[in-house]
Amino acid sequence: MLGWAATFLIIAIVAAVFGFSGIAGTAANIAWVLFVVGLIISIVLFIAGRRPPL
């Protein structure tokens, strides 16, 4: 998930350099959403893996 976020961030940076502001904005928004979703999933899995054995 975070790999896809990094990919879209790079696409956004390249598009911004070449002046494609619409594509850059869209790619940046997708990168932000994927980063937040990946972060939430990582936190949930980290907490779920810390359960004491029963």
Image (cartoon, grey):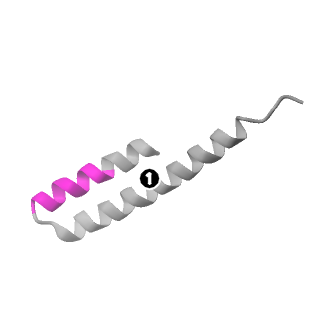
| Residue on which disc 1 sits | 35
Q: Where is residue 39 in the image (x, y as percent from the top left)?
A: 52, 49
Residue 15 among magenta residues: yes
Quarter holding the C terminus is top right
User: In terms of depth relative to the viewer, which is nearer, 36 or 3?
Assistant: 36
Within the image, what quadrant is residue 49 found in? top right
> Magenta part of the protein: which range?
8-18
Q: Which amino acid does label 1 sit on?
A: Phe
Q: Position of residue 15 (x, y in %)?
A: 17, 59
Secondary structure of the residue carrying tag 1 is helix
Q: Residue at x 17, y 53 (%)?
A: 14
Q: Is residue 44 above or below residue 13?
A: above
**In the rendered image, the vertical position of residue 42 relative to residue 23, given as above or below:** above
- In the orientation shown, which residue stands out farthest toward the top? 53
Relative vertical location of residue 12 with respect to residue 38 in this rendering, above or below = below
User: Can you tell which quarter of the image residue 17 is in?
Assistant: bottom left
Residue drawn where x is 34% and y is 46% of the image? 6
Q: Quadrant of the rendered structure where residue 47 is? A: top right
Residue drawn at x 72%, y 35% is: 50
